[in-house]
Amino acid sequence: MICSVTRKLKVVPGCLDDYRALANYHYRDGSPGPFAAIFALKNIGQPNPVGVIVYKMPTPGIELRNIATGNLFAGLDRSTQLALINKNIRCISRVIIEPRFRGLGLASRLVRETMPHINVPIIEALAVMGLVNPFFEKAGMKSFAGKLPARCTRLIEAFSVVAIEQHQLIDPQTVQRKLDRLPTRYAEFIELEIRGFLQSYGDRRNMSPGLERTRYVLSKLTERPIYYIWFNRSLVSGNW
């Protein structure tokens, strides 16, 4: 059954409408901003996307990029550095899979199949939820991560205590449904843990329980995002 479903899906050039159709399923709110490319995963003959990936121009200053590239873009004057980064790097901004099709490896497929079509030597990504859903690594990217803050580790473990597992933390709606159904003693326990976690986030510490708060909490679970990088060897070998 799974094979028959995935065989009917094809990666095709996409547009902002494809992103908008699935944007509500992503843990980050709002527009992805200016984009460099969009690809969609669609059933053959069907207009609605099952998945979407958005590429954007790179952010200039990323500390883990220097580690991953051996300081290739460091030690240059500002204008030269920006020109080199913009010429050679694109960043994956969003990867979204419609919930009914999750668990089939489609996020990794979207990344793996589209990266070679972005005609630059380096593809990178910053994944807030990379620890709980490492699909970038499954697609062939290499990860570089800073230390996870203790408050994030504690809350991830607390979610596990109430049977909300790490792989579910990418889906705020699923997490909220589980929170709403918890028995009283478990609900009180996780509420205390969430409120404790939010003490580090200023005026957000007093957010009311609900989907908006859950979405925000999940977006902050890794204070320092994991950096992922992929080298297009057919282009890298000819330039560097």
Image: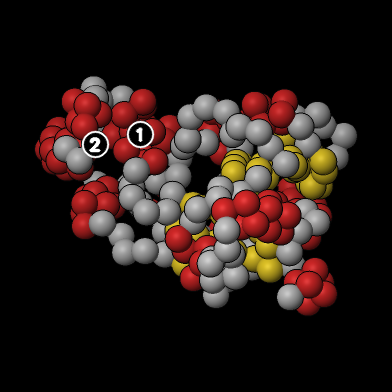
- Tell me the colour scheme of the image: secondary structure
- Say which residue label 2 marks: 201
Examine the rendering and report whether any part of residue 95 can be seen.
Answer: no
**10 Å crowding of disc 2: few (<14), some (14-19), many (20+):** few
- Depth check, mark 1 against mark 2: the one in front is 2
Q: Nearer the viewer, residue 84 or 150?
A: 84
Question: Which amino acid, by three-letter code, is at mark 2?
Answer: Tyr
Q: Quadrant of the C terminus?
A: bottom right
Q: In percent of the image, x 81 and y 47: which residue is there? A: 10
Q: Quadrant of residue 178?
A: top left
Q: Percent x, y for residue 91? A: 62, 50
> Which residue is farthest top?
208
Q: CA distance from mark 1 to mark 2?
A: 10 Å
Disc 1 marks which amino acid? Tyr
The answer to whether 207 appears left or right of 236 in the picture is: left
Give the labeled residue for mark 1. 216
| Residue 155, horizontal then vertical, whole percent | 24, 49
